[in-house]
Amino acid sequence: MRIYLDTSVIAVYLFGKHSETEAGRLPPVKKLFDLINAHKVSATISLYTVQEIYSFCRRTFGPEDAGHISRISLAELFTNDFELAGLLTREERLLHRVRFAIGDLSDQPHVISAYLTGCDAIVTYDRHFQKIKKVFAIYVPEEIIGILSPPG
């Protein structure tokens, strides 16, 4: 199985230990990364996620610290075993935008990237993705962990 990791999951992995609101999400996200690094599941992240992590750092820590903090955070992220998907071409966006219509247009490149890289599911905490659940499997980390390592 190949999964696409949305920025909402990556942000928890990188910054969850610093956020009370994300603290409950951190253990399952870390477990998911353990499964990825143990090759129980293949994962893909896109360059869109890299840009969104920088933007997150800019909003959260300010423009003067964003470059430094995002560089350190991305270095930590890149110690994990995943594939990196590039940016979409104009043709790819135009060809697939109707099939993967989603409320938040900034999430559309993630869905198209997941599709084009052969992912079976998107793992996210972002509720916008629920709109395409009939076209693409959408899970939160806790659900995909249950699928990958069922109890008993």
Image (tube, rainbow, N blue to C red):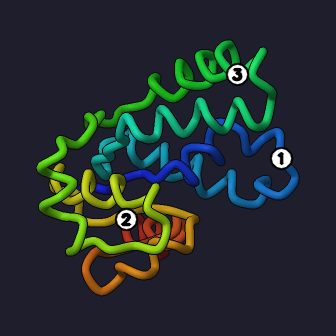
The mark nearer the N terminus, 2 or 1, is 1
Mark closest to the chain's N terminus, 1 or 3: 1
Residue picked out by circle 1: 19
The Cα atoms of the two marked residues, 2 and 1, are separated by: 27 Å
- The answer to whether 66 is drawn above or below residue 59 in the figure is above
Residue density around tag 3, few if under 14, some if 14–19, many if 20 or more, within 10 Å: some
Distance from label 1 to label 3 (Cα)? 17 Å
Identified at 57% across, 65% down, the residue is: 125
Q: Is residue 96 visible?
A: yes
Q: x, y (%) of residue 136?
A: 28, 75
Residue under numbered circle 2: 148
User: Can residue 1 be seen here?
Assistant: no
In front: label 2 or label 1: 1
| Viewer-proximal residue among 146 and 63 | 63
Q: Quadrant of residue 133?
A: bottom left
- Local packing at callout 2 (Cα closer than 10 Å; few below 14, some 14-19, many 20+) is few
Q: Residue at the spot x=43%, y=62% of the render?
A: 105
Classify residue 135 by image quadrant.
bottom left
Q: Position of residue 114 (x, y in %)?
A: 27, 55
Could you say whether the residue bearing mark 3 is in a helix, strand or loop? Answer: helix
Q: Nearer the viewer, residue 77 or 65?
A: 65
Q: Which mark is residue 103?
A: none
